[in-house]
Image (tube, rainbow, N blue to C red):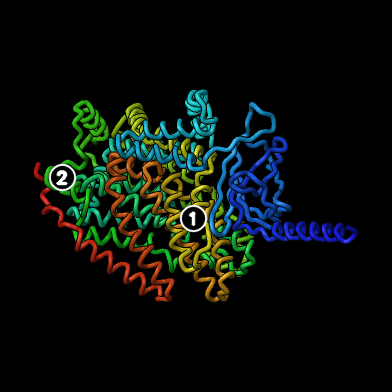
Amino acid sequence: MKLYKPLLSLLLLLLLSVQAMAQDLVSKEDIEELQLQAINDTAFTLRTVTETGNLMKYSGVLPLRINGELQESEFTDGETTFSLPESADLVQVSANMGTHTLARLYRMDVEEERGVREFPMWLSILPPLIAIVLALIFREVLLALFAGIWIGGFVIYGLSFKSIFTGLLAVGDTYLMEALTDGDHVSVIIFSMLIGGMVAIISKNGGMAGVVNLLSRYAKSAKSSQVVTWVLGVAIFFDDYANTLIVGNTMRPVTDGHRVSREKLAYIVDSTAAPVAAIAFVTTWIGAELGYIKDAAASLGIEEGAYSMFFHSLEYAYYPVLTLVFMLMLILMNRDFGSMHKAEVRARTTGEVSAVRTDRAGQEKQQQEMAEFEPIDETRTRAINALLPVLTVIGGTMIGLLYTGYSPEVWDDAGIGFLRKLSITIGDSNSYTALIWASLSGVIVAIALTASQRIMSLTETMESLVVGFKTMLPAILILVLAWSLAAVTQELYTAEYLTSLFSGNISPHFLPEITFFLAAVIAFSTGSSWGTMAILYPLMMPAAWYVCQQQGLSMEETMPIIYNVISVVLAGSVFGDHCSPISDTTILSSLASGCNHIDHVKTQLPYALTVALVANIVCTNLSSFGVHWLLVYAIGAAILWGLIKLLGKKNEVEVVPAAEVA
């Protein structure tokens, strides 16, 4: 009996030790669920548990993304605490467990003090998904966007009968209000309206007709008019918004005269704007790109400068570069395929540059709007009346960018080259302010030219300005709703959820392809390439770095993968933006080209997909095997040429434009 008690105690001690050892051996791959509990309005406890809710006493560091912020959390016996700077209505938590990914979204339960309630993360993709599907099916973009925002409000406000009405009211008093009170958004609205007003004035004073006559020397056919449009799109490289509105509005009368479909014009305008702005050295994009790259590189201890990393990443900018090459090939080969070919055949054979609508009232309204932009005196068509305001906008934008971004310290630094100084200045500039200054100056010049030559009275000129404002209203409504939907997706952490779905243990050589696909999905769902870059650069650059380190790759082997990831975040963002019907640049391209928005999306989508597949599957894989980047570009271009020959059909023989027949 005396021996029994010590043995029993020893056995019990061994069992407790084994249990403790087993608990200590819990790895992150064993964690099945995350459970959140609110301590108060700002403090939370997170537990690692099984599917049935039993605590798993994991101890160690676990990388978490909490409300979009990546942080290393120290767990002790399966628990960690964190706090948010402000009271949070929604708390999103995601973690990569190695073999699987956990993503959870919680809402503060207002009916229960310090309570939280979980709802499925997949609901976060419902608002943009519904908006995109409804827009493509019913061709009513305003209604589709409104429905997406409403559904988002329904999810955010609790998935209850009451939240149906709360979400509906929130569309107006919350999301639309926030979209209209954002300074950058208001800047885009003002800039767009001023450009629309300027176009109306230079159309009525005969300036646009003069430009058409001037460009007709070079744009003598459908093919050459498209080439001129492409060249202008590449030349105005410093900002995608300015590119879209200036090129679309300037070239529309020229391409109409040669029976080029509005769908093709919108494609050329849209697919030169963002790709050129994304890869050029001096653009309004460069500041944001370098900022994201610099922050991520600093966190990883990479000593190479952000500008140098961006420059090296251009070797892998397959989608933007091949998009420009593919577009030029289509024009020079006079071939198209899919719905774009049907649109071109319609335009060449019937003269209907836009799809004919069965609604007679709609057609009459369109004809009335076109009449409002006809020259008031067809005998006085001077190109200078249009060129001078347009050049004022272009030059004014560049001057505004340099003025708002100028820093004496940068320009006095003898160790920095001129191009680098120029790039830093443009990157630090306030592009929205510069665009407003430039467009306002363009309007003033247009009014002064018109009034001084007595082409129209001051009253008639101002009436034309108001008519131009009115033509921008449909696109502005779409923009405001698209921004509101973007706010909903941000509040639901849609992008973070999509990111968490594709996280996991993968080969470093597959990271660029996965990153491209992930960027495309996020940009397509949110309609924002800038938002996608803001999310993925801080996530994918460290992910690529750590995966390469885990695989034992040297610095010389790691950096090309980092460069490639930098490039595909940008490329995937532009591609997803091109395909999304809720993207602001896609909307502006439709507007500037006078093309039905859904027609533009449907005709551009096959072309964007074609280039994306070649760029991502062929070119990215070849580069991962060490093929020289110049050869990769050549192979990609050759494949695209072959696809155009295989899939493309010759457009109908060009006919004499209706204006020339008359």
Instruction: Give the residue number, with chain letter if any, for mark 1.
Output: 502
- Residue at 49%, 67% (x, y): give it: 507
In the picture provided, is 47 more to the left or to the right than 461?
A: right
The secondary structure type at the circle numbered 1 is loop
Give coordinates of residue 93: x percent, y percent: 60, 46
* Disc on res. 346: 2
- Residue at 61%, 48% (x, y): give it: 50
In the picture provided, is 368 more to the left or to the right than 656?
A: right
Q: Dot 2, crowdedness within 10 Å: few (<14), some or many (≥20)?
A: many
Q: Quadrant of the C terminus?
A: top left
Give coordinates of residue 337: x percent, y percent: 21, 54
Amino acid carrying mark 2 in the image: Arg
Can you name the residue that lies furthest to the right here? Answer: 2
- Residue 445: image quadrant is top left
Amino acid carrying mark 1 in the image: Phe
In this view, the residue in front, 632 or 218, is: 632
The secondary structure type at the circle numbered 2 is helix
In the picture provided, is 399 more to the left or to the right than 108?
A: left
Counting the numbered discs, the total is 2
